[in-house]
Image (cartoon, rainbow, N blue to C red):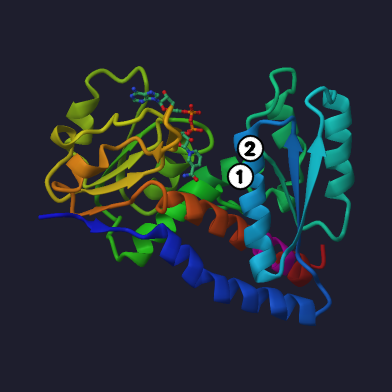
Amino acid sequence: MAARIIDGQALAKSMQAGFAARVAELRKGGTEPGLAAILVGDDPASAVYVGRKMKACAAVGIRSFAERLPSTISNTELLGRIVELNSDPHTHGILVQLPLPPHIDMARVLKTISAEKDVDGFHLYNVGGLVTGSTVFSPCTPYGVVKLLEHENIPIEGQNVVVVGASNIVGKPMGLMLMARDATVSICHAKTRDLAQYTILADILVVAAGVPNLIVSQMVKSGAVVIDVGINRLPDGRIIGDVDFEGVRTKASAITPVPGGVGPMTVAMLLENTIKSAERKLALRI
Ligand code: NAD
């Protein structure tokens, strides 16, 4: 039996009207939600991602502006610009597109963004909040995965979840967010011995390793839900995920495609966080 395809593109699109209505409400009250996207250097993929985010903002009425800074910028200059944006009342969300040039102290950059404007959810306060259940902004990609699972009515509580990939921006927060929803979570990574012995137990398998075709059907339990976060560009220009989609779809009960699965949900959650930030500011008068 072929798996149901989980259409992240469609869900992200269906959320647009709700976002636009919230933005209209904010505007009525005199607040124009604003997002600053800082792009350091000229990495073409990063420019594409920032462009997509800005287009999505425009579609729902969020004012966004990209700050294109040269790759030669110093740590002090970059931190100074973030500090300025932290106190700009018209900026409700600040994102710094990763990766950053090697001379930039990424941890310091992420820590400098005000936790109140940290719409990517990478600030230590928000990361810590994932552990205690008090986060203000959840990181967009794992948040998008949770929304997809909820929308598809896929139960999380009590399920065996295996997350492949343990990065700070996807794998680890993904594990914490699913643990907070009472899943039993295993997190695997590049040093995990015999990956398949874990993946085969997963009721829900989330893969975020950045390795094309890492997961093949023999590694997947019959009827599992498979969420492919990976984005890999092949030499011929095609984009594929980390899962052998054609092989695994015959075994899984539901699967996300790449592209069109998790990617659009990541952008949708950025809009959600930016609107939430503006709403909080209004409610808390901060
Ligand atoms: P990363 O390189 O920071 O982390 C990769 C993780 O995968 C590490 O923990 C590493 O140990 C693990 N890993 C690598 N090879 C492995 C292997 N053979 N077996 C098991 N684990 C292995 O990457 P990241 O930033 O977490 O991104 C992961 C993937 O997700 C990339 O393809 C990235 O492009 C994609 N991504 C997609 C979105 C989206 O919106 N869809 C967002 C962020 C990242």
Is residue 275 shown in magenta?
A: yes
Residue type pointed to by label 2:
Ser
Assess whether mark 1 and mark 2 are in contact (beta carbons under 8 angstroms): yes
Residue type pointed to by label 1:
Tyr
Q: Which residues are magenta?
A: 274-279
Rendered-image quadrant of the C terminus: bottom right
Please give the residue where the numbered disc 1 appears in the rendered image.
49
The picture places residue 6, in percent across and down from the top left corner, at: 32, 58
Pointer 2 local density, CA inside 10 Å: few below 14, some 14–19, many at least 20:
some
Of 259 and 106, which appears nearest the observer? 259
| Disc 2 to disc 1, C-alpha distance | 5 Å
Pointer 1 local density, CA inside 10 Å: few below 14, some 14–19, many at least 20:
some
Residue at figure coordinates x 73%, y 65% from the top left: 278
The answer to whether any part of residue 180 appears in the image is no
The picture places residue 102, in percent across and down from the top left corner, at: 69, 18
Q: How many numbered marks appear?
A: 2
The quarter holding residue 237 reads: top left
Q: Which label belongs to residue 46? A: 2
On screen, residue 259 versus residue 195, left or right, reads: right
Q: Is residue 111 above or below residue 11?
A: above
Q: Is residue 48 above or below residue 213?
A: below
On screen, residue 44 versus residue 65, left or right, reads: left
Label 1 CB-ligand 1 distance < 8 A:
no
Callout 2 secondary element: helix
